Amino acid sequence: MHAPAAAPTGAAPPGFRAEPRAWTAEWIWSDRPALAPPGPDNPFGRHDPGRFDHRVLFRTVFRVAGPVRGARLFITADSRYTAYLNGVEVGDGPVRHGPGTLYYSVHDLAGALVEGENVLAVAARFYGHPTPWWEPTPPTFTQGGGSLVAEVEVDGSVAAASGPHWRVREGDAWERCRPMGLLNSQIPEAFDARLLDPGWTGAGFDDTGWAPATVQAAHAVTGPRGRTRPGGHPYGVLLPHPLPPPAVTRHAPVGPPLWYALPPGADPDVHTALAADAAVLEDGTPAGPDRPGGRALAVFDLGRIVSGRTRLTLDGPAGRTVTGALVEAVTPVALGSAAPFRVRTRNGRTRFTASDPSGGRYLVLSVDGPDVEVAVAVREALRPRPAGAGFECSDPFLEHLFAVALRTVDLTAQDAYLDCPTRESRAWVGDAVVHQAVDLATSPDWSLAVWNPRLLARARPDGMLPMVVAGDFARDGVPPIPDWALHWIRSVHLLYRYTGDREAVAELLGTAEGVLRWFARHARPDGLLHDVPGWVLIDWSPVQVAGCSAALNALWGRALADFAEMAAWSGDPGRALWARDAHARLAEGFEAFWDEERGAYRDTLGPAGPGRGVSEHTAAAAVCARLVPPRRRDRVRDLLLDRDAMFTRSPLADHGVDERGAYDGTPVHLREAPDWDTEARVVGAQPFFRYVVHDALAELGAADALVDLYRDWAVLLESGPSALRECWEGGSFAHGWSATPARDLVVHTLGVSPAEPGYASVRVAPRPGRLEKIAGRVPTPHGFVEVAVENGRARVDSPVPVEFSHPSGRVDRFPAGERTITLHHAFPRGDQP
């Protein structure tokens, strides 16, 4: 019988409402929050631009009598914190969040707690400037410019709680730094170890010179004094961190560093020093593993892309400067897009851990002088991937691709999915549909897959989603990527299909409807969207989108169909009818894109009729949107399978760490008029949009062909063997949206997906193609579904009823349990009886 397994674990669903925690702790900070006094133009106060990147250190002492069964720290801060108990780091946070909200974390203290006196220390940081993972909360008279709340619970009783008795000191050992630029808005870190006693986090440290903490009272209608405990304005009720604790791994270099000699003298500015020194990477000759005298540049190879907080151990005299960054490639361009750090040493041993995580394979350090010994590591803290699920087959390449794809998603699964840890670290609204789909198909832990759609559901006043949430690009004035919001609706649909959580779907349907109605305002009497504003991206390929875009209309059609299905399932026939009517009008109007002679849908429609471009984006999205009449399905399938006709061209090969150097702000010309033979060539999809292409081919009965299409990913494995790159032609070295083969090997090749919402029953439709055997264990809320296919027979072991789809089209249904099925193969096309 089927192997028992726990249901997918992790976050409460989006509709979840936890009981507010009854906090004993009060909000505290130093007496200098980053708030400017109110005035005629800002009656409720504003951020003080002079107090950006503000750090504050906290300490308190509490006693524990006798052995304890358990101890936990409840804590959050605006913007960031790192907590220590008796000198041992116990956690950092908070989770990525939007403005006006905060989530508290719970850290286990059992390993660091001692009988008697204990010291809790916290290093807190208020960014001030928006970063890729933080937006400022609109401030009040008293809060929004730096806040901390924390309490220790021992055996269920509060042993320590933040308040005026805590000791506080300004973090003047850190220089206040500004973001490096628009795209690279991470804030550098400059730390002078001479200005901070390294024992400040432990017992025996004298903090009598520190000031008492300042308690912050929430602004109240009756005056500036209000509640001092969580629950008031501007953060509201604090809910628990929705994700599991990370799994921590230490990565050390795989060998000795490569050294380069540097000229004397150093640029004191952390923004420019490393980039200037890195010129030696192009013009200098490496000295090899033997360190040269004087100033030198060291390149440490970690062996693969990692993501975490850099740690240095430096031994030498006081006042030496070490500047560095973790980068994905050893080029001046890569260093120019990384967030650097600078450390000034104290006498003897200096330990430094970067405040914020970053990603890369190489740690590049500029070392001021030969008398500083350097040891490096990266503390990687990624979400855990529990054992149990898996995929295997007779093709070692596909097994390797599956593993690398999972690693890529894990690298980009910080808090709730981001684009890449090596450059931007932003939570783009559309990217995450691939990350989420991979997790739902391959991981027993669905916490991020459940949490992500809720995090992203932060609509603008007009109903559209911003291009990024919980980060700098979510600000007013940054245009949206309209089609990315449609991918988000697909993400909500995946949540509906896999979890079957009615409360979750009901909460998100309102946001989804707002997005769809935003598009509906741009629909004309022909039922089509015309001249949609914003950045219509579709993909990093030259898909034509001017005027009336077929690909955008098709994505809107798929979202309308998804929404209608979810609304009907949720018992909302009115919303479902509205979406179906809009879809019907769209389907009628979409016929204008079809070119019978070309045998394809054209990409655009203008006053003079259809444009010239043809893309697999339009063809695939039209299939997924149910816009292709049965009489055309064979021709569309033939177009998608004609791989010799496909070509791609990405602007990302022209900036970043690739061919032409750093992006200088010049607009990227992605939508040039076709200079290719549009009657013979088809614009092919980049890795991201291939999830739509693969869905379309499966819908068209060509899922067997995917086994060969996965081999397109060989070029990504060649240029980045430890993580998947952003585009076929370049881009970042760890981009989660390229990981769709991990989903597709399970969903389309092994053929396991929900037949009913919440896996009330499972659809099993194996399509092994040329593979001699395939097998896998797929997580569901009811346990694992196990499938193995070899020699024309399939063994299925399922905890729920099975709908088994044969290649011939025949469907068998049988109850939960184990069964062996003989596959009924399809006849060659044209030979069906």
Image: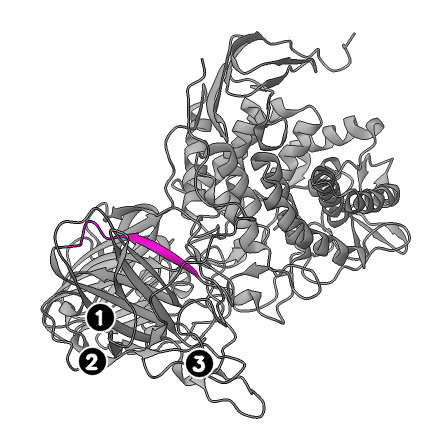
Q: Quadrant of the N terminus?
A: top left
Which residue type does callout 2 highlight? Answer: Trp
- Camera-side residue of 418 and 490: 490
Where is mark 3, residue-wise? 142
Q: Where residue 446 sits in the image (x, y, percent)?
A: 47, 39
Residue 705 within the magenta-colored segment of the rendering: no
Crowd class of label 2 (few under 14; some 14 to 19; many from 20; radius 10 Å) = some
Q: Are marks 2 and 1 in contact (CB under 8 Å)?
A: yes
Q: Residue at x 65, y 10 (%)?
A: 825
The alpha-carbon separation of the residues under discs 3 and 2 comes to: 22 Å
- Camera-side residue of 65 and 338: 65
Tell me the magenta residue range: 103-113
Where is mark 2, residue-wise? 210
Residue 107 within the magenta-colored segment of the rendering: yes
The alpha-carbon separation of the residues under discs 1 and 3 comes to: 22 Å
Q: Where residue 317 sits in the image (x, y, percent)?
A: 10, 72
The answer to whether residue 512 is above or below residue 61 is: above
Colouring scheme applied when the structure was drawn: one colour
- Camera-side residue of 214 and 714: 214
- Secondary structure of the residue carrying numbered label 2: loop
The answer to whether residue 588 is above or below residue 289 is: above
Where is mark 1, residue-wise? 59
- Secondary structure of the residue carrying numbered label 3: loop
Crowd class of label 1 (few under 14; some 14 to 19; many from 20; radius 10 Å) = many
Which residue type does callout 1 highlight? Answer: Arg
N-terminal of the two: label 1 or label 3?
Answer: 1
The answer to whether residue 545 is above or below residue 825 is: below
Tell me, yes or no, if residue 685 can be seen here.
no
